[in-house]
Image (tube, rainbow, N blue to C red):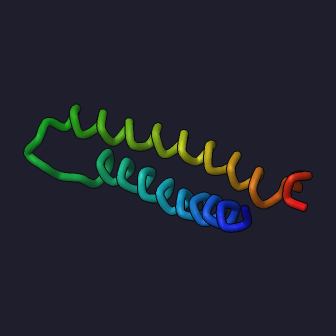
């Protein structure tokens, strides 16, 4: 039981880094990426990455609050 809880905590911390990656990649694609590809497609993909990063940030926040700051009765 404790191993599963530990893996959930590690996964929650790893998800923070993934949020930073998705947000950073989206910002990079929108503002700094120079290519011969259609800029509208790159902008849409960058916006999708930013929106997905925001969604992952919310779910990561909920998981971190649940895992680190809430005391469950089943933990005893």
Would you place residue 11 above or below residue 53 in this image? below
Instruction: State the image coordinates of residue 10 (x, y, percent, origin top left).
Output: 60, 66
Residue that lies at the very extreme toward the left in this rendered image: 36
Question: Which part of the image, by quadrant, shows the N terminus?
Answer: bottom right
Quarter-of-image position of residue 3: bottom right
Q: Residue at x 38, y 36 (%)?
A: 48
Image coordinates for residue 28, horizontal then vertical, percent: 33, 54
Which of the pair 9/52 is nearer the observer? 9
Q: Which residue occupies the foreground of this view, 32 or 70?
A: 70
Left or right placement of residue 23 versus residue 1 in this view = left
In the rendered image, which quarter is residue 36 located in?
Answer: top left
Residue 68 in picture, x, y percent from top left: 78, 60
> Count the marks: how many?
0
Residue 16: image location, x then y, percent: 56, 59
Task: Locate residue 24: give its quadrant.
Answer: bottom left
Q: Quadrant of the C terminus?
A: bottom right
40 with respect to 21 (left or right): left
In-image side of 43 versus 16 (left or right): left
Q: Residue at x 42, y 58 (%)?
A: 21
Name the residue located 42 percent from the left edge and 51 percent from the top edge: 22
Q: Is residue 34 rendered to the left or right of residue 50?
A: left
């Amino acid at each position: 039981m404790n191993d599963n809880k530990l893996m959930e905590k590690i996964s929650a911390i790893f998800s923070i880094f993934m949020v930073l990656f998705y947000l950073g990649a989206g910002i990079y694609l929108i503002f700094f990426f120079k290519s011969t590809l259609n800029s509208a497609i790159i902008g849409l993909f960058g916006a999708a990455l930013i929106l997905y990063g925001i969604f992952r940030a919310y779910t990561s926040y909920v998981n971190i609050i649940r895992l680190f700051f809430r005391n469950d009765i089943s933990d005893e």
